[in-house]
Image: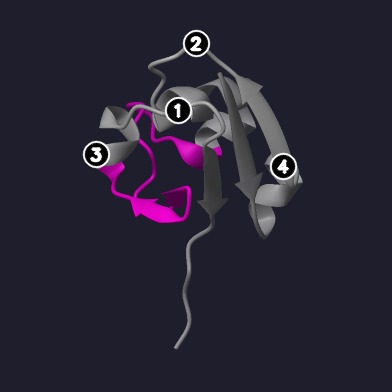
Amino acid sequence: MRITIRSFARFREIFGTEKLIETDSFASPKTVLSLLCKEKECRDTLFTPDGTLHPHITITLNGRRLSTGETDETTLADGDTLVIYPPVSGG
């Protein structure tokens, strides 16, 4: 199964603009993001030391925002697109 991962802002420097990840069926977004992060800098950027996704990062699946729990529980399908957004701040 093929999953497209896109990233924006500072995440482009780490992950590139777009990556295609091939994985077994029944993979979750968290599993696919773990496959993307082979280097420590990448893992530390997305995941806390206990392996959960940093709460300030936004992940969307085919345009729909996923909660932290959904990144573990959602099953991806061939052709899905995950987008990684950095923290948003402003005033």
> How far separated are the C-alphas under marks 4 and 1?
18 Å
Magenta residues span 45-68
Q: Secondary structure at mark 4?
A: strand
- Magenta stretch holds residue 78: no
Q: Are marks 3 and 2 in contact (CB under 8 Å)?
A: no
Give the mark, 2 or 4, whose residue is nearer the N terminus: 4
The residue that mark 2 highlights is 24
Residue 18 numbered tag: 4
Residue toward you, 60 or 54: 60
Question: Left of 18 or right of it: where is 60?
Answer: left
Name the residue at 48% across, 62% down: 87
Q: Which residue is mark 1?
A: 77
Q: Position of residue 14 (x, y in %)?
A: 70, 41
Position of residue 50 measured from the top left corner of the image (x, y, whole percent): 32, 27
Q: Secondary structure at mark 1?
A: loop
The first of marks 1 and 3 along the sequence is 3
Q: Which residue position is annotated with label 3? A: 69
Is residue 37 among the parts visible in the rendering?
A: no
- Dot 4 or dot 1: first in sequence order is 4
